[in-house]
Image (spheres, rainbow, N blue to C red):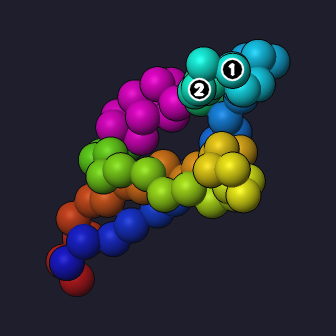
Amino acid sequence: MLEYEFEEIACDDGGGGYSLLGGFGMETVAHREIIARRAAEGWRYAGYVPRRQRGSGYMETIDLVFERQRPET
C-alpha cells in the first residue's frame, strides 16, 4: 500500500505581475531541493496540487505530493 505526504511551497511572480501581452512569470521557491531531499528519504515525486490560488488563476502556493511504499508489518 502506498502512503502520501505533502509539502507546501510558495510561488513567486518575480515582481513582474501580469503583462499586456498575456501571461506572467512564475517560479517556485526551493522545489528542486525539496524533491531531491525527499528522494534521498525514499519518497517519489508524484505531482502537485494548487493550494492557494487567486481568482485570476495565479497559484500563490502549491503542495508537492510525494509517495512511497508503506513498509509491510
Q: Nearer the viewer, residue 62 or 26?
A: 26
Which one is in front, 67 or 23? 23
Label 1 packing within 10 angstroms: few (<14), some (14-19), many (20+): few
Q: Main SS type for the magenta part? A: helix
Residue bearing mark 2: 22
Q: Which mark is residue 1?
A: none
C-alpha gap between disc 1 and disc 2: 5 Å
Quadrant housing residue 65: bottom left
Q: Is residue 64 left or right of residue 62?
A: left
- Identify whether 18 is placed above or below 60: above
Viewer-side residue, 17 vs 65: 17
Q: Which residue occupies the extreme bottom position in the image?
A: 73
**The N terminus - image quarter:** bottom left
Q: Across the whole image, how many numbered discs are drawn on residues? A: 2
- Element assignment for label 1: loop
Tell me the number on the disc at residue 19.
1
At x 76% / y 16%, what residue is drawn? Answer: 16
The residue located at (33%, 71%) in the rendering is: 3
Q: Can residue 61 be seen by looking at this rendering?
A: no
Q: Magenta stretch: give its range.
A: 30-40
Q: Identify residue type, mark 2.
A: Gly
| Residue at image location 35% in from the left, 50% down from the top | 47
Name the quadrant containing residue 20.
top right
Going by the numbered disc 1, the residue's amino acid type is Ser
